[in-house]
Amino acid sequence: MTKLIRSWVDSANAPDTDFPLNNLPCGVFSLEGDEPRCGVAIGAMIADVAALEEAGLIDLAGGPVFDVPFWNELMELGPEAWATFRARMVELLAEGSDWRGEVEPHLVPQDAVELHLPFLVSEYTDFYAGKNHAFNVGTMFRGPENALPPNWLSIPIGYNGRASSVVVSGTPVRRPWGQLKAPDAELPVFAPCRRFDFELELGAVVGQPSDGMVGVAEAEAMIFGYVLLNDWSARDIQAWEYQPLGPFQAKATATTISPWIVMTAALAEFRVPTPPRDRPLLPYLREPGPLNLDLSLEAALTPEGGRETVIARTNARELYYSAAQQLCHHTTSGCPMNVGDLLGSGTISGETKDSRGSLLELSWGGKEPLEIVPGVTRSFMEDGDTLILRGHAQGDGYRIGFGDCTGQVLPAAGLPDWAKE
Amino acid sequence: MTKLIRSWVDSANAPDTDFPLNNLPCGVFSLEGDEPRCGVAIGAMIADVAALEEAGLIDLAGGPVFDVPFWNELMELGPEAWATFRARMVELLAEGSDWRGEVEPHLVPQDAVELHLPFLVSEYTDFYAGKNHAFNVGTMFRGPENALPPNWLSIPIGYNGRASSVVVSGTPVRRPWGQLKAPDAELPVFAPCRRFDFELELGAVVGQPSDGMVGVAEAEAMIFGYVLLNDWSARDIQAWEYQPLGPFQAKATATTISPWIVMTAALAEFRVPTPPRDRPLLPYLREPGPLNLDLSLEAALTPEGGRETVIARTNARELYYSAAQQLCHHTTSGCPMNVGDLLGSGTISGETKDSRGSLLELSWGGKEPLEIVPGVTRSFMEDGDTLILRGHAQGDGYRIGFGDCTGQVLPAAGLPDWAKE
């Protein structure tokens, strides 16, 4: 396994930073009063790649790539340019670099900036590729015998989400209104969601367009990178609305992603196989090699004014279908995929109770409220709660991380007059 | 009711043209070898609004609006600009206009152009707002007693579709591959769709962004216009994939829209109430007045080398939920809506057998193949078939139409090597 690539940015050499030189994740930041611009996290700093490009220290396309505050233009250039970009950043930032003097003025401390969405989300698809999650949810609703839907072991089940609802870490999330129907009620009411939840997911960022049906190996090469993703979910809205056409408003309030896209290349060494197949896949979905990622993941909850408690620890290797398999399946119908498409993995839960990636599972549908600190329990998210996702791959003396993916739940808005009786 | 507004473009005064001066629908066209540009249909001609703007005959924003080949920029300017634009086009094109000499050089015959997507589709949502369709489909799958899902009379049920799959009329549509499972088979196969279908729908084009939850009246004012919409559907792919998260690849091959957006203002006089409520709606969904549209709709099928047969005639007034109600519901969760969002109505079927807006219903799931001409039947679309949607509102001596919305089904692509056993 590759060792830490040492940088002249000291903080990038710490074993517990998310951002060693091996990582080089892509984000968009702004200093107070300034316009957002592209940057790469390095230790506790951000390398302002827009400024480096302006200074002639990066030249990828014979013209500007970072003159816009999103990474889609680099994605469009394709995998060779992605590799060139990484190699150049290593040259500039490595210990002993000849360019230190020229680069150093373009470093900004992370604690001085605001972070923005790192890319323009073209369309957003959310999969359901975690088997333990699907099994847990199915058990709650249909019992353990019929927990997995019959198609689940054949298809990476997914649905289209709403790209306009994707927000960057740190954006508050307002509790939604919706139609709720109590199990014993005949008719629904219009009320604020009572079972608001998070979902711990990994998001894959599509960096190249498709041209017809795409195989798993080709799909893998199209994935620019990964983000942590919290698919906020209104369980009670979903329960009433989702038959027969799937979740809609239950998933449309917000989806929070980490501020940093970790490029696929930074995770190459952390490939692991998907779990054993319960039954063989159709040939088109078979993997050319290990495509899952060994990423330690955790979810933590902080009540307003309280302290943080980690409520779940799991790993992305639990996914039954890799992002490449999801993307391949996505194209079978001829569906055109584009630069900037975001694929959520679905909730990643482990087999144990403390590795479940949603409150729905952790509190077993609210029947077993989770004690987060003595005397404080949660069945679902309460107003003021902040939910934090973290994740990293563990290298030899370094880690590749995403930064925190956080969101605080705000109380529901007041009911507008036109919606009153 | 308003009379025909006579134009100096003779063909616009014919009682059976889709494009009298009362209509002024928005499209994008190109002459051979030229770049696409915005135009308005007038009789058998197109007024090149990009050229009219360049010539100083249209000035909406003190700067160019039509320097791009899509109508999103006019949408962004808002309802006042939409009205100003229409009023100016009437001035320019009306009988006796002072500007005839200046405008006439910027008219292009429709039969000399290629038509393109009239707007950039931001996101695409498909509703299920036709009660007869929902009842027919439910009856086929669950019997007439349980035909309508329990939520159907409370919620404008919808799901997110795939904007990248929206194509303009005339674009061929290739039969998709997908996972198919026969009712008596244990496992699926990967094969070309065998039950490929059309759906006759009306599409609403959102012309203004939302800011939080939007009421029905406000939603109505945000709708820039309407298109005809054919939501191509792979029934066999859908049957196997759609539980529990809804249709996905079954709806992702293509959605064909008419080349012309008919502006809401052109349809103002053709408002009719939605059908009687089977039970009262929640207050937030109640209508401030008649919001449905009295639009005669038809679907016709032409086998390759054969002649056209109208296979269904229906009316948009059959919709149980108007586009404004759909849009209002879409925002309840806080989901941000944007300029260029497209809302499909869901299949519009009448109560009679010959008014059903899909082959699934017309052939009753393939059990009663439809005879289109003596000896020629269809259960679902066959390769080479062309499906045509048409629609118009009938005024006093004129009609407001959309132009044909057509698509020909091409045979499935060959199976790539990587997908073979």
Image (spheres, coloured by chain):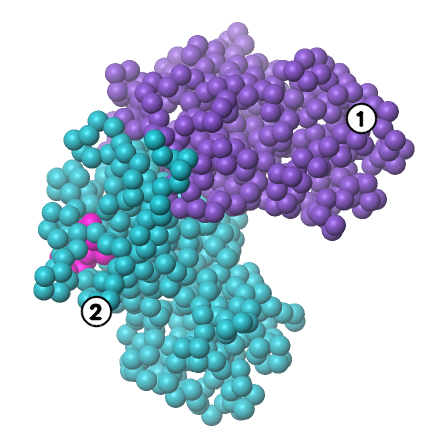
Chain colours: A purple, B cyan
Q: Is residue B143 above or below residue B264?
A: above
Q: Is residue A20 above or below residue B304?
A: above
The C terminus of chain A is located in which quarter?
A: top left
Q: Chain of mark 1?
A: A
Image disc number at residue B307: 2
Q: Tell me the kind of residue under disc 1.
A: Ala
- Same chain for mark 1 and mark 2? The answer is no
Relative horizontal placement of residue B201, taking residue A218 as reference (left or right): left
| Residue under the point 62% across and 81% down | B55
Residues in magenta, as a range: B349-362
Q: Chain of mark 2?
A: B
Of A243 and B277, the residue lying toward us? A243
| Residue under the point 9% across and 64% down | B374
Q: Is residue B100 above or below residue B411?
A: below
Of A322 and A170, the residue lying toward us? A322
Q: Tell me the kind of residue under disc 2.
A: Arg
| Residue under the point 57% across and 77% down | B51
Circle 1 SS class: loop
Relative horizontal placement of residue A189, taking residue A160 as reference (left or right): left
| Residue under the point 54% across and 91% down | B101
Circle 2 SS class: loop
Of B101 and A88, the residue lying toward us? A88
Asked if residue B68 shows in the view, the reply is: yes
Give the residue furthest to the top.
A374
Label 1: few (<14), some or many (≥20) within 10 Å? some
Q: CA distance from mark 1 to mark 2?
A: 71 Å
Residue labelled with disc 1: A94
Asked if residue B360 is among those painted magenta in the image, a careful observer would answer yes
What percent of the width, then of the height, locates residue B173? 35, 55
The quadrant in which residue B373 appears is bottom left
What percent of the width, then of the height, locates residue B12? 38, 83
